[in-house]
Amino acid sequence: MKRTASGVLGGLLGLVALSAVAGVLITATVTPAIAATSYAASSSIKMFNDMPGYLTIEKLMLPTEVYAKDSDGEDYLLAQFYDQNRIPVSFDEVAPVMYDAMLSSEDKNFYSHGGIDLMGTVSALIGNARTGSNRGGSSITQQYVKNVLQQNCESEADGAEEVKACFEDSTVSKGAEGYKRKLEEMRYAIQLEKQYAKNDILIGYLNIAHFGGSVYGIGAAAQYYFNTTPDRLTIAQAATIAGMVQAPNVYRIDKPDGTYTDKNGVAQNTAESGYEKTLERRNYVLGRMLADGKITTAERDEARASAIEPDITPRDQGCKLAEGAEFFCEYVVSIIRTDTAFGDSREERNAALRRGGLKVYTTLDYDLQAAANKAISVVPATMRNIDLGASGIQLEVGSGRVLSMVQNRPYSPEGAEEGTTAVNYNVRELNGGGGHPAGSTYKVFSLINWLEQGRSVNEYLNGRVGTKKVQTCDGATQDTKTGNGRDEIANFEGSRGYNGSILNFTKDSLNSGFFAMAEQLTVCSTNRVAMKLGVTYGNGTALDKQNLPYDVLGSKDVAPIDMAAAYAAIAGKGILCDPKAIDRVLDQDGVEQPLPDTKCERVMSEAVAATSAYTLQAVMSGTGVGARTFDGTPIFGKTGIHEYEHTWMDGSSTEVTTVVWVGNVQGFAKLNRFTASGYSLSRIRNSIWPNMQRAANAKYGGDKFPTPDKELTKRVYVDLPSVIGQSIDQATKTLEEAGFNVVVGDAIDGTESAGTIIAQNPGSGRTYGGATVTISPSNGEGVVVPGVGGTPDDATAQLRAAGFGRVEVRCTETEGAPPQGVVTGTNPSAGTVVNRSASITVQYQAESCGGGRGGRP
């Protein structure tokens, strides 16, 4: 390339300036006493000394490793992440031939100079001045300095452009800046030689040096290129690796199609050519080793005769490594990238993940994860006509530790492959699926709300189908209507509901019963109970921004991990623990690091928690009967189905909580119209949940739940209204709305019009809520027995006149009574309502009854 006069002059002027200092350096480093006698030298030394002299060697950029425990409790590598593939090694873990190759090719005088190879540096500077380049001539110590400066810059870089700028600043700056950089390297190198032993500098360089692509350090280079360790490198392998440092991305041997193209677009350094450029460089290194007496001629010849035969061994990274636990891995990564425990800024947190060399020990339980994967496998990854998803998650009660996290679709970082996804259905905004309608599992918050108001689960309400006036918030009410506009509430499988207790409403998951509760509890207060237990919308926003009647039935989209934490709080005697995926973090020096701030705090009283658990246990003999575990461990649970589009099972032992969801990822296909693995999709939860919970019970066990609170389970006295005089329908409605069950008895004789209630049992007053009341209507055929008097004939006439056709008389002989007799009463007595066809007996007294006692006169 032609150079302009100004370019040449600039290079020469730079050389003159650098040469003045170089001369001083020669004097200062070799004969400092002589240098001190010269004023010029003193001035140059002052200029040199004014440059930065202390080099901070930051920690190496190392992969962050994520661990889980296997069945034996031993830590195993789950996944790793890095910008630079580096495996640090100690000095004695590297074969001597590797040191020989590096020193012969890069700095043969390393052990004799004071940090600067003066002859090599001056020679390089003269050449640079002539050509305008900034080629080598640096000692190993200077190269180490350059790499340290570059890494110090890259460790804070955000993105590829900033990394590129770091490289350019430390390697390819031109003109005066280039000379300045060279001088600074020299200054730092001299200082490093004073601080560190030669062997420390040499191994430091080998651990930081770039060997092409993302491979850094001799440990990773030996593994990646030759599937070996640095202490087992052969002469030929060592010479190949040593040769790479001059142009790592040119001399790398992992690109069979070539590492670059020439000006004609022809690929160079291909496998087909035997990696000819790398081969030339390797053979140069072998020649230098022979010249320095590091190897024999025979060894050189043998190595030269060998072909370059890479055994490329990639060090994979990312969550695809976490086979069977990829979504849990991504959850951990999302925490590292967002939690301030790993850095105050996004850049710091990303650097911690990809460059920090952290060892992150997670909460994952290998056995439960394996069982959960097997359980969820009954749900296919894809089905025709439905975008089907399924997930399962388990938390440890009392700590919030995430023990398992699975879903039906295989993991793919981009979700590009059919039947795969990158979305974690279990979580919320941290790469989550945005949540899913909770269905009736959300009713647990109405239950807790009820109990926190001091109300008993054995209190009775009218849970029959019909329009309810639900309290939404702040005094507002709203009628319930089904989607088709009818003024009534739909129950699962067409149930018309009943008057019953809160316990039975929960056991049977009775929608109309929970709407009856919502007539007495505001929807917003129930939503706030859910929020208090850690539940938000799937996007992380508050649940009480909008409060609608159907919220109490689980219409809001929530994340399974939040629901699991809430149910674990019930099992945990009212203590809510934030979900926790990380147990321990160590930096690359083995020092414990701060953990994400996950706390456990009381969110409900022990009495409320115990009574909630007691009530939810009843579900396992109700709607949850299909999810029983039959292993003797006490469990509770709650089922949920939302419009047949989503189905849930949430439940727990005293030790482990399990939540399962199956539903539409997108769309509104009806689960009950599809089957898989022999199950209707609307019921397939009954295969997944018990298998996951059984595995947890087998490993963690479980105790009996605490005894429910007496006040919160007592039978409640209520006012029983009188319905006498009402119609059958009116009386039935009155009693049912008051929370009583009604039985309509046979019609009885009454003067009231037919159908009018004339008797109830029990009668009005105070009685237990939920009691059964028998009401008796009039048949309209009743007549009141009139009061009669006079003689028996008079009384008989009076009764016949009142409409009674069957009249008898009964005499009682009484001394002094009138001979014709005197009436004393009737049977039935006067005022009694009887049927017109009833027989009425006139009772009278006479001195003599004639034909006998009780006969006619």
Image (cartoon, rainbow, N blue to C red):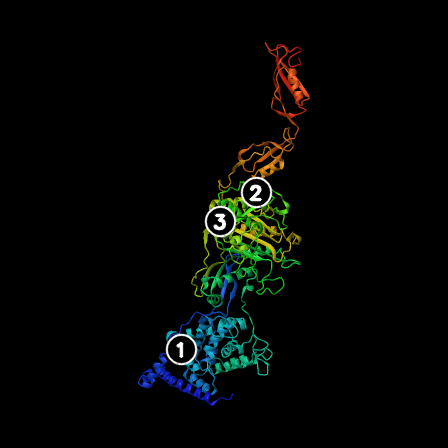
Camera-side mark, 2 or 3: 2
Residue on which disc 1 sits: 189
Camera-side mark, 1 or 2: 2
Label of residue 504 in the image: 2
- Amino acid type, residue under disc 1 in the picture: Ala
The picture places residue 289, in percent across and down from the top left corner, at 48, 81
Q: In the structure shown, which secondary structural element does the residue marked by tag 2 occupy? A: helix
Tell me the distance, in whole angstroms, between the alpha carbons under discs 1 and 2.
81 Å
Tell me the crowding category of disc 1: few under 14, some 14 to 19, or many 20 or more residues within 10 angstroms, Cα based. many
Tell me the distance, in whole angstroms, between the alpha carbons under discs 3 and 1.
61 Å
Ranked by sequence position, the earlier of labels 3 and 1 is 1
Ranked by sequence position, the earlier of labels 1 and 2 is 1
Q: Which of 438 and 358 is in front in this view?
A: 438
Tell me the crowding category of disc 3: few under 14, some 14 to 19, or many 20 or more residues within 10 angstroms, Cα based. many
Q: In the structure shown, which secondary structural element does the residue marked by tag 1 occupy? A: helix
The picture places residue 428, in percent across and down from the top left corner, at 53, 58
- Amino acid type, residue under disc 3 in the picture: Gly
Q: In the structure shown, which secondary structural element does the residue marked by tag 3 occupy? A: loop
